[in-house]
Image (tube, grey):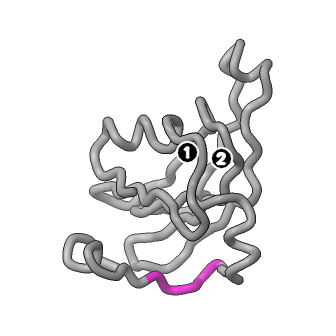
Amino acid sequence: DVSDTRQLRMIGLSQHEELDSGHGMLFVYPDAAERTYWMKGMQFPIDIIWIGADCNIGNLTENIPIPDETSEIDGSYLIFESGKPAQFVLEMNAGYINKNKVFIGDSVVFLDPLSGKYAC
């Protein structure tokens, strides 16, 4: 799935009950900037891959748990930060980064149909 509008980015994966293995959601921004994410409404844990405008992985956040009941009630969600400017953010099932040996500095190449639409 691709979230390339403000509205789609706000919804993100919160309306998904799960992700199929090897599938994810790519968030696309018009520019690179430091990004923050939270897990509001999430029903499964994820990994986040933060990708810069240069198409290199700038940071990784692994095994983010679903919010606990207290967070859902009082809105005290944990915030996850890119730490570096990111133009693309890829959310995958928790464990994807470790299983697929993804590392900071790795290059990202989008395949069809994304290759013609986005820079990487």
Left or right placement of residue 58 versus residue 44 in this view: left
Question: According to the image, label 1 marks what residue?
Answer: 36
Tag 2 and tag 1, C-beta contact below 8 Å: yes
Name the residue: 59% across, 30% down: 41
Query: Looking at the figure, which quarter contains the N terminus?
Result: bottom left
- Which of the 4 image quarters holds residue 102? bottom right
Does the magenta stretch mainly form a helix, a strand or a loop?
loop
**Residue 7: x and y, percent?**
32, 36
Q: Say above or below: 28 vs 118.
A: above
* Disc 1 secondary structure class: strand
* Disc 2 secondary structure class: strand
Query: Which segment is the magenta one?
Result: 104-108
Q: Which mark identifies residue 80?
A: 2
Name the residue: 62% across, 68% down: 59
Q: Residues within 10 Å of mark 1 (few under 14, many from 20)?
A: few
Q: Nearer the viewer, residue 4 or 85?
A: 4
What's the amino acid at mark 1?
Answer: Thr
**Residue 21: x and y, percent?**
61, 66
Left or right placement of residue 38 versus residue 53 in this view: right
Query: Looking at the figure, which quarter contains the C terminus?
Result: bottom left
- Which of the 4 image quarters holds residue 38? top right
Whether 105 is among the magenta residues is: yes
**Residue 116: x and y, percent?**
20, 78
**Residue 46: x and y, percent?**
67, 54
Name the residue: 57% across, 43% down: 37
Q: Nearer the viewer, residue 28 or 114?
A: 114
Q: Say above or below: 29 vs 111.
A: above
Q: Residues within 10 Å of mark 2 (few under 14, many from 20)?
A: some
What's the amino acid at mark 2?
Answer: Phe
The numbered mark, 2 or 1, whose residue comes first in the sequence reads 1
